[in-house]
Every structure is written in C-alpha cells, then in structure tokens.
Image: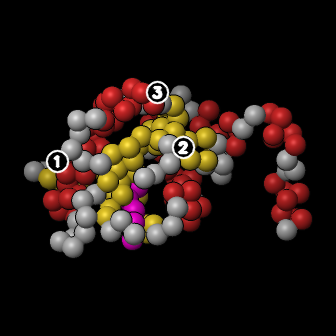
Amino acid sequence: MFKDEYLLDYINLEDIDAADDEDVDERIVEHTIVSNVKRFMMTFGKDFAYVGNQYHLEVFGEEQRNDLLFFNRQLNCLVAIELKGGKFKTAYLGQLYGYLQVLDDQVRKPHENPSIGIIPCRRANRAFVEYAVRDYTKPMGVATYKTLDDMPEMFREALPAEDELKKLL
C-alpha cells in the first residue's frame, strides 16, 4: 500500500503558480523531483530505486514517455509515476494503464512482479477516484501532494526559516 498524500515541500510553488499551462506545472514538478530524487523516494518509503525520468516506451511504432520510473525491491516490481499538476481526471488512468501494459510486456524481467502505477495530482476526490479505478486490472493508485506553501499559515509562522534551521544544524 502507498500513501494517499505526499509532502513535496522542496518544490518551489512560485515557479508553478507563474505558469498557466498544466503541462508546464508537471514539468516543473518533475524537474524538481529529479533534482531531489533521494528526497522524493524517501517520501514513498524504503526500497525504492530510481530507474529514470521521461522513460521512453514504444509499442507498435507509438512512442510514449512515462514521467518517472522506479523499482521497488520489496515488491519486486517497477513503479510508474505519472505526475499531474491539477485535479484528477479519469483520462489519467488510461494513460497510466497504457504505460503499465508496455512496461510489463517489454521492460519487466521474468522474475519480477507486474508493474504498478501511481498518479500524484494536486487535488482528487477520493470517492470518485475509487469509483474510477475499480474495474482496472492493473494495480494503480491516485495520491495528492502538498508543498510547503500548502501548510497552514500558523504552522509556517511558528517554524524557523530554512536558513535558520541550517545554521542550527
């Protein structure tokens, strides 16, 4: 089981909020995660290994690129992450399902378990997500993520600035 929500406090929301295009938002989030890949993997838990970003997949002459690809040693399977900058849409499931099909058919090793996928997005209606994923045959999940800017103001004011914490450490 994976968490329903992840704290990505190292993402600079000013860069995201400045962009109008949801795809630009996703690229900024992806770039920040790749730059902080160790921190990102630790939000998911132990035993994750980074495989790549914009992982090239091709089947029947159709090229696709999965945002982030990891391998989980404990589960012995590939974990495809498809980042989304806005609210969850059912079309995201079809996109991820296609990636999982190609990963299982062309990338997965014979001794590995079937691939799983996660769609982190800014917002999601949990009941609607459960309804939308119930008949898919591949293991997929949707999670939300929060950044430091999503923290309630009273907590942000109570915590010391990042520079002050670094000095203390």
> Which of pointers 3 and 1 lies earlier in the amino acid sequence?
1
Q: Secondary structure at mark 1?
A: strand
> Which of pointers 2 and 3 lies earlier in the amino acid sequence?
2
For residue 71: magenta?
yes
Q: Amino acid at mark 1?
A: Glu
Residue 2 in the image: above or below residue 110: above
> Which of pointers 2 and 1 lies earlier in the amino acid sequence?
2
Q: Amino acid at mark 2?
A: Glu
Name the spot of residue 169 as percent of width and height, x first.
85, 68
Q: CA distance from mark 2 to mark 1?
A: 32 Å
Residue behind mark 2: 5
Residue behind mark 3: 125
Please state which of the two labelled residues, at mark 3 or mark 1, is closer to the viewer.
3
Residue 116, picture quadrant: bottom left
Q: CA distance from mark 2 to mark 3?
A: 12 Å
Residue shown at 39% from the left, 69% from the top: 74
Name the spot of residue 109 as percent of width and height, x first.
21, 71
Residue shown at 31% from the left, 30% from the top: 132
Q: Secondary structure at mark 2?
A: strand
Label annotation for residue 121: none
- Say whether residue 99 is visible: no
Q: Amino acid at mark 3?
A: Asn
Label annotation for residue 62: 1
In front: 165, or 32?
Answer: 165
